[in-house]
Amino acid sequence: MNNLNSDPLLNRKEAAKYINYSYNTLAMWDSTKRYDLRPIRIGRSVRYRKSYLDAFLEQHRFSAF
């Protein structure tokens, strides 16, 4: 099982860059619940666990063939 204490937290800008989407796209997904990236809200800031972003990428990858 993944140790969540060692799972890096990325801010929205870092998370967007990591999954190759825009900052605004992640903000929209959070507000519309289109994809549940399980954001962590700390006051006004938002963080994403890298392991959840990795799971999202794995679920949404597709072949160009």
Image (tube, rainbow, N blue to C red):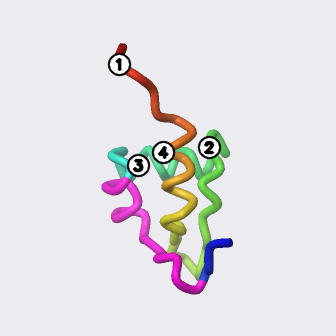
Quadrant showing the C terminus: top left
- In the displayed structure, does residue 54 sit left or right of residue 64? right
Q: Which residues are magenta?
A: 5-18
Q: Please state which of residues 49 and 25 is positioned toward the viewer in this rendering.
A: 49
Q: Please state which of residues 18 and 28 is positioned toward the viewer in this rendering.
A: 18
Which of the two labelled residues, at mark 2 and mark 4, occupies the earlier sequence position?
A: 2
Quadrant showing the N terminus: bottom right
Tell me the CA gap for discs 1 and 2: 22 Å
- The residue mark sitting in front, 1 or 2, is 1
Q: Which residue is mark 2?
A: 35
Q: Residue shown at 64%/60% (left/top)?
A: 38
- The residue mark sitting in front, 4 or 3, is 4
Say if 7 sits above or below 5 in the image: above
Q: Residue shown at 60%/54% (left/top)?
A: 37
- In the displayed structure, does residue 3 sit left or right of residue 13? right
Which of the two labelled residues, at mark 1 and mark 4, occupies the earlier sequence position?
A: 4
Q: Which residue is mark 1?
A: 64
Callout 4: 10 Å neighbours few (<14), some, many (20+)? some
Which of the two labelled residues, at mark 4 and mark 3, occupies the earlier sequence position?
A: 3
Q: Which residue is mark 3?
A: 24
User: Can you give x and y, in whole percent of width and height, for residue 46 in the image?
Assistant: 52, 70
Tell me the CA gap for discs 1 and 4: 15 Å
- The majority secondary structure of the magenta stretch comes to helix
Say if 44 sits above or below 21 in the image: below
Q: Please state which of residues 30 and 3 is positioned toward the viewer in this rendering.
A: 3
Q: Amino acid at mark 3?
A: Asn
Q: Amino acid at mark 4?
A: Leu
Magenta stretch encompasses residue 11: yes
Q: Amino acid at mark 2?
A: Tyr
